[in-house]
Image (cartoon, rainbow, N blue to C red):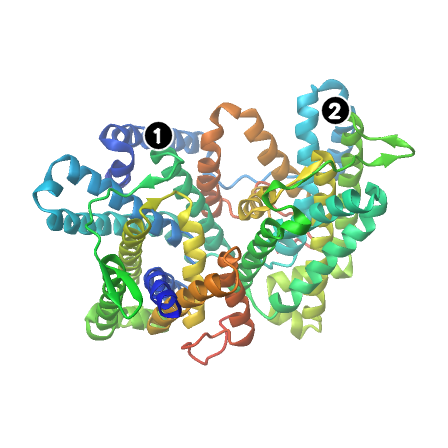
Amino acid sequence: MLLQQIINGLTVGGVYALIALGYTLVYGILELINFAHGEIYMIGAYLGIIFLGIFTASGLTQYSLFLSLFLTFIMSVIVCSAYGFTVEKLAYKPLRNAPRLNPLISAIGVSIFLQNYVMLTQGATDKVFPHVLPVTTVKFLDVTMTSLQIFIIIASILLMAGLHVFIMKTKTGKAMRAVAQDKVMASLMGINIDRIISVTFIIGSGLAAVAGLMVAMYYGLVNYSIGYIAGIKAFTAAVLGGIGSIPGAMIGGFVLGLIESLGASYLSSEYKDAYAFIVLIVILLIKPTGLLGKSEGQKP
Amino acid sequence: MLKKVLFMLWCALLSMPFMGIKGGAYLFLGICACYAVFVLLSLVFGKIGKPSIPVNTGLLTLLLMPAAVAFPFIARDYYTDVAILAGIYIILALGVNIVIGFSGLLHLGFAAFYGIGAYSNALLTTNFGLGFWSALPATLIITSTAGLLLAFPALRLRGDYLAIVTLGFGEIIRLVLNNWDSVTKGPNGISNIPSPVVFGFEMTSLTSYYYLVLSFVLLAAFVVKRVYHSRTGRAWLSIREDETAAEAMGINTRKYKFMALTFGAFWAGLAGALFASKMHFVSPESFTFMESVFVVCMIILGGLGSIPGVLLGSLILVLLPEMLRDFQLYRMLALGVGLVLMMIFRPEGLIKKGAGVRGQGAA
């Protein structure tokens, strides 16, 4: 029972961690809570359903399930990244030098817009993810894991490791770290700030798209309103791990997933959504820098 | 020019998975048309964002008062009903304006205080047989205390963190209202909340309730205006403009932030109580995060920190959706776009805060 809940928690936690990375990356560079990020994740989930629908209708899925799913992933990530990129250009870039309240409100506006845009174009009812995946369960001790759970946990860990390598080893990653430390200095060193910010949004949105797709496959249902609550929880995960810190976001995501899953089974499932907020408030009060945050104190 | 058209094409392309190829094409034409209109308008009226409406509040009040008083007699019942709702929102928005507009604390959980006010009124009147007036002081004390209690954790944080914590607080309150079945009756809500009684006269008719709300609106606007022009109001403004400088000037910023949150919650509680006794019914659905955002939109639309702005913003955002019933589906969409455009082109709101603190032009 305990082990089973831990596995469930890790599955959800992997998803939170992927979304949390988007928050942390953007916050690290712009110091903006990208309220619309949850909506980007929701769009990723919808795109998965839409593209898989197109591939199924064109007969590709029947021909090769693997190829179809692979293309669905690729297409969703590309289009979702394009959404993230466009949102940044339209709603945040003009406000880069405005008081900090303004981009935050603009982000809330984008979030409301995207939610209603999806609701109007795709309908307010739940969308069902096509049942194309063969589900096999693995029994280990007295724990049952579906193949999907294993896939989600492994895929999220791989993506995070990949991101970590990207940030640490590549030139663009180095530039991103430089911009996060000091924008002015970085631009004096010849780094194109606009480009780096765009790259950040593209990466964050791509990860959110993967998270959205995995959730759509895991629960089988998608609704236009899933973005808000998932966004808040992922933000909590980012704060929990120390906002701005990439390993922090990963750990925060898994810890939050565990807290939720254990809390729901041992305390009360009615308040499942409240745990994240309570954790958030407690963390901000006790250790605002989070688990792995730098000890430079809270950013004003 | 070509770049802009290409960008519109790009947006239309992005929308195709959701709207289909035809939908995307229509969208492209639509955005192009909107952009053309925008360009034409800005050619005719000069650059957008420049004109600021000069408001003489005294004169305006003098002109609008008779209209407000005569309103229930000239308008249909339906509009009186809408006006009552607008009045309740004005009171709520005045409270939010103290916290966000005056003190610059981005509070995104105001629906919680609104909800606490409404539920306190509902529970006190239905369970203990109190009337509206005898329940009101208790309601106001409960909500102000809630504001004060939230202030303890919230004020250790600044900026974005404060926004998120208050948002979390709002969600927790809503979840509690939704799940604490034995007291709040959960999602079913509480019904049969009595109407207020004034001098033995029960205010069941729309007209009488309209006057009740109107008098509370006037009271709230008057009190908030007086406080705004007091030492406290100036302290709040200085905290908004520069907290460090305010502290250096000897302002006890912590104390004034506590006052702002408590005072703001006080008005939210009053609005909640009025809402409960108007609707005779409360349920957690009325106090969601969207409600908090809606009120924030009102004060941003009107102009942060400006009292006439709050009145105007609330009126527009309550009346406009009612008038555009046919486009109901699109109103939230428009609200989202509106917020973004507002932030880019006119962050100071419709009414630029000109009057400011007495004797000085406000910053």
Is residue B260 shown above or below A188?
A: above
* Tag shown at residue B36: 1
Left or right for A69, reference B271: left
Q: Quadrant of residue B227?
A: bottom right
Q: Residue at x 9, y 46 (%)?
A: A64
Q: Residue at x 56, y 66 (%)?
A: B158
Rounded to the nearest angstrom, the CA distance separating label 2 from label 1 is 39 Å
Is residue B65 shown above or below B190?
A: above
User: Of helix, strand and loop, which one carries label 2?
Assistant: helix
The residue type indicated by label 1 comes to Ala
Outermost residue, right side: B199
Q: Nearer the viewer, residue A45 or A7?
A: A7
Left or right for B122, reference A89: right
**Residue B231, percent across and down?**
77, 61
Residue on which disc 2 sits: B71
Please say if the residues under marks 2 and 1 sit with CB atoms less than 8 Å apart: no
Inspect this view and state whether residue B1 appears.
no
Is residue B228 shown above or below B273?
A: below
Q: Quadrant of the N terminus of chain B?
A: top left
The residue type indicated by label 2 comes to Phe
Q: Chain of mark 1?
A: B
Q: Earlier in the sequence, mark 2 or mark 1?
A: 1
Inspect this view and state whether residue B61 appears.
yes
Q: Quadrant of residue B215?
A: top right
**Residue B31, percent across and down?**
33, 32
